Amino acid sequence: MLSHVIHLAPFAALLAFMYVGLAAHVIRYRYRHRLALGIADDDAMLRAVRAHANFHEYAPFGLLMITLVTLVGGSSILVVVLGATLVIGRVAHAYSILVAEPRTQTHRWRMLGMICSFVVLLVSAVFLLWQWLQVSP
């Protein structure tokens, strides 16, 4: 079981790099536009802040759920699929907010991001409950 945790490591590392990148984007924008706090009715600043905040809202919980799946006996294949799905979802969602929507007003990337993130959370939750039911008296 614990040996499967190593399969989650590259996904956690990729998400950490992405988190720092999104935070750096907000910091650079604040510095360039002299925005110490808030968004000052600036749509690009709002998008940068929301891309970072949404990542912060979903990525850690997704990683926690996948880690629990690993610790209670999830296979390395399941861990890899869940990890890859979470990374794809978070990349798609950030891309949607920062790049796609300001130009095209399409929500398909955001929908893909949310679907991937929800799939990770729901599959993990079902797996964890199933495992609990297997060992409960």
Image (cartoon, rainbow, N blue to C red):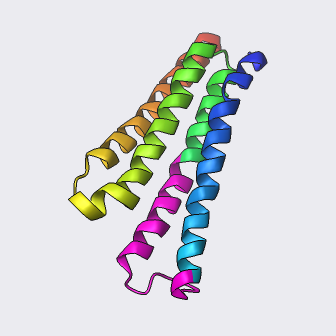
- Residue 36, quarter of the rendered image: bottom right
Is 47 part of what is drawn in magenta?
yes
Q: Can residue 137 be seen in this view?
A: no
- Identified at 66% across, 22% down, the residue is 70
- Residue 34, quarter of the rendered image: bottom right
- Identified at 41% across, 32% down, the residue is 119
Q: Where is residue 33 in the image (x, y as percent from the top left)?
A: 51, 85
Q: Where is residue 10 in the image (x, y as percent from the top left)?
A: 67, 32
Residue 91 lies left or right of residue 132; in this view the side is left
Q: Quick check: 56 above or below 127?
A: below
Q: Quick check: 129 above or below 113?
A: above
Is the N terminus in the top left, top right, bottom left or bottom right quadrant? top right
Q: Relative to the observer, which residue lies in front, 114 or 102? A: 102
Q: Quick check: 55 above or below 65?
A: below
- Identified at 55% across, 80% down, the residue is 30
Is 31 part of what is drawn in magenta?
no
Q: Relative to the observer, which residue lies in front, 19 or 57? A: 19
- Identified at 59% across, 82% down, the residue is 31
Magenta residue span: 32-58
State whether the magenta stretch is mostly helix, strand or loop: helix
Q: Where is residue 20 in the image (x, y as percent from the top left)?
A: 64, 57
Residue 33 lies left or right of residue 31; in this view the side is left
Q: Can residue 24 be seen in this view?
A: yes
Q: Where is residue 6 in the image (x, y as percent from the top left)?
A: 74, 24
